[in-house]
Image (spheres, grey):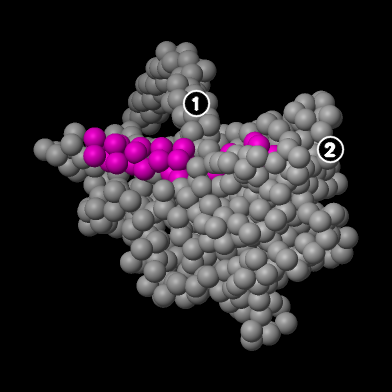
Amino acid sequence: MKQGSDDGRLFFRGLQNRSHEKMKLRKRKSTLYLSPRKSTERRGDLLGENIYLVLFTIALRICNCFLVQTSFVPDEYWQSLEVAHHMVFNYGYLTWEWTERLRGYTYPLIFASIYKILHLLGKDSVQLLIWIPRLAQALLSAIADIRLYSIMKQLENQQMAKWVFFCQLCSWFTWYCCTRTLTNTMETVLTIIALFYYPLEGSKSMNSVKYLSLVALAFIIRPTAIIPWIPLVFRHFWQEQKKLDLILHQFLPIGFVNLSLSLIIDRIFFGQWTLVQYNFLKFNVLQNLGTFYGSHPWHWYFSQGFPAVLGTHLPFFIHGCFLAPRRYRILLVTVLWTLLVYSMLSHKEFRFIYPVLPFCMVFCGYSLNHLKTWKKPALSFLFLSNMLLALYTGLVHQRGTLDVMTYIQELCYNNPNKSPASVFIMMPCHSTPYYSHVHYPLPMRFLQCPPDLTGKSQYLDEADIFYLNPLNWLDKEFHNDSTLPTHLIIFSILEEEISAFLISSNYERTAVFFHTHLPEGQTGSHIYVYERKLKGTLNRR
């Protein structure tokens, strides 16, 4: 009996081994059949997505770049390109933020590197200095768009990703901002890419080190970038089982490395150790001195700012908030948190809430995905309304301040035989770009407007004093004809008020540039260029 049972055991073991070998063979066979298909898919991918989708997105953002020919806010030039120009070519203007060390050199260093390469190649023409940084920013924005599509495809499906992607690409405010050299634009790019690696439920690309590194970099570039990430990082910490490991092995090392990098970069260019992130937050948040540049009521973001930035996406956003699954609640909380925090600061701008706009597109995508009967009319409405607004703001509204810089370039490069020109920009301060858009050491001047940092109650800057009585200011400033600039640049609204000075000083209007259909305050509808003529050649128009 014992012999028979041992034989039976051996028999069954043999059967198991044979079946195990067969299973192995079947597994290998299926792997062989599948591997060519996988390798083919990899060959057709770029950034983890279909190569045609990636190339389409990059091409669209390049077109976007060339179809934005207007100015938005001074910071897109004065806090990036102008600083980079000064770093590489040793001339340019550094605003008071740089003398007070409120800004860091990390972001301008990107453009300074581009300028340096162009200079070494002997290709540092003014047009390349203007457009290459913007094209670089457009490329980064395209990568962010693709990452937004990828994360939605992981969390949901390709259909849902397609609608979110559509909403992102046709957003008028994204079109208006995403190719501008603003720290807010870079902050938005880093926020979207960081979201791709953030540990959302269902994500297949979560990587704490990568997302925290991108958040830390965004903080270094613009310290207020931490605001949208406070609820997201807190949620990550709350859900993490090994909280101490997260702090010791990720939060602290990543923060230390990024802050050290920022300190070293700023030490090189400031010449002393400076923690610009603290200075920035102290000025804008703790002391709230940003009110010098304007203040709005607490509800402005809810009543005007947020609806304007979302535009015709707003009803779809509201609809999507009721449809989206629970796991997206954290994105809605982040949007509301950001609006509330910025509402507590007196100085408010549309661009400050730009980084949470892509989060809103997730909810808009949900709305479009659930529409059945009205889907085609809704898509047509969204596309046409946004593109009309995008093209108007990108090609028409506030274009004069850039067009007039082309005129100034011509003074430098097209008239070598003429006597040296000098330019005085008599407009609200920082209305135009400066040396980054001229690339020539032309004597230029503009009305200064640094804030008062000493606490004076009745402080007036140079621009304020000028606009109180322009004619009186000009008579005092230019009592000697030899100090008069060859060219004056003014908004049309100022012409009548200083006409006596223009006539007595022999200035003739030589160029007119359209600026805006919506003039307000000291900003006129057109920009006038006046050139000082010799008495014998004067011919007023």
Up/down of 401 relative to 52, above or below: below
| Mark closer to the chain start, 1 or 2 | 1
| Magenta span | 379-408
- Around disc 1, counting alpha carbons within 10 Å, would you say few (fewer than 14), some (14 to 19), or many (20 or more)? some
* Alpha-carbon span between mark 1 and mark 2: 44 Å
Q: Quadrant of the N terminus?
A: top left
On screen, residue 99 versus residue 131, left or right, reads right
**Residue 350 position in % (x across, y down):** 46, 58
**Residue 452 position in % (x across, y down):** 69, 77
Q: Magenta stretch: residue 282 in it?
A: no
**Residue 233 position in % (x across, y down):** 51, 62
Q: Quadrant of the C terminus?
A: top right
Identified at 83% across, 40% down, the residue is 420
Residue closest to the eye, 270 or 509: 509
On screen, residue 44 versus residue 221, left or right, reads left
At label 1, which amino acid type do we have? Ala
Up/down of 273 relative to 365, above or below: below
Disc 1: which residue: 59
Q: Residue furthest left?
A: 373
The answer to whether residue 48 shows anywhere in this view is: no
Disc 2: which residue: 419
Identified at 75% across, 69% down, the residue is 476
Q: Magenta stretch: residue 396 in it?
A: yes
Based on the displayed image, in which of its 4 quarters is residue 290 positioned? bottom right
- Around disc 2, counting alpha carbons within 10 Å, would you say few (fewer than 14), some (14 to 19), or many (20 or more)? few
**Residue 44 position in % (x across, y down):** 48, 19
